[in-house]
Amino acid sequence: MPFNHYVLTLTGVAQRLSSVLANTTIGNPEDSPVYSLSIQPGAANANAAYVGDADVSAVSYAVRLEPAVAGTPPAPFMIESRGGVKPSDLWVIGTADEILHIGIVPMRWDTRP
């Protein structure tokens, strides 16, 4: 299975995780179900970021991603969805110009050797 990594620059407003993809159209081949996904705040982030649905905010979220401490980011948040989640299903919000590192292992539908 291939592994893809991206850097998402936060805008200060809720944005789909799929906004890091080259093709941001919902449901495009890049926005297909993932085997696993990781999200880790940047080492220079000073503020928390939040993961949730389209209504994500600092008071309504599923996961709070803590900021880095002394230049060391926290462990990544991991989702092992095995095909149950697409990047466009997840929304994030955080301080403008801070970053999130995204790792995606897409589902491999063709299981031939």
Image: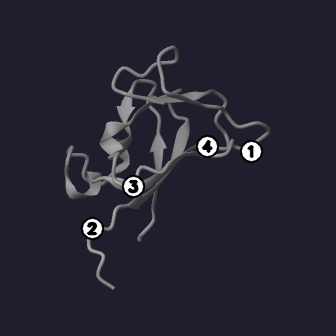
Which residue type carries mark 4? Gly
Q: Which of marks 1 and 3 is in front?
A: 3
State the residue at coordinates (33%, 85%): 113
The quarter of the displayed image where residue 46 is located: top right
Q: How many marks?
A: 4
Question: Which residue is labeled 3 in the image?
Answer: 82
Q: Which residue lies furthest to the top in this view?
A: 59
State the residue at coordinates (45%, 54%): 36
Question: Which residue is labeled 2 in the image?
Answer: 109
Going from N to C along the chain, the mark reached first, 3 or 4, is 4
Q: Say which mark, if any, is on residue 72.
A: 1
Badge 2: how crowded within 10 Å, few (<14), some, or many (20+)? few
Q: Nearer the viewer, mark 3 or mark 4?
A: 3
Question: Which residue is labeled 4 in the image?
Answer: 42
Q: Is mark 4 on a helix, strand or loop?
A: loop
Q: Which of marks 4 and 2 is in front?
A: 2
Which residue type carries mark 1? Thr
Q: Which residue lies furthest to the right in this view?
A: 70
Residue 35 image position (x, y, % from top left): 40, 57
Q: Choose between 71 and 103: the one closer to the eye.
A: 103
Residue 8 image position (x, y, % from top left): 46, 44
Quadrant location of the N terminus in the rendered image: bottom left
Marks 2 and 3 sit apart, C-alpha to C-alpha, by 11 Å
Going from N to C along the chain, the mark reached first, 2 or 1, is 1
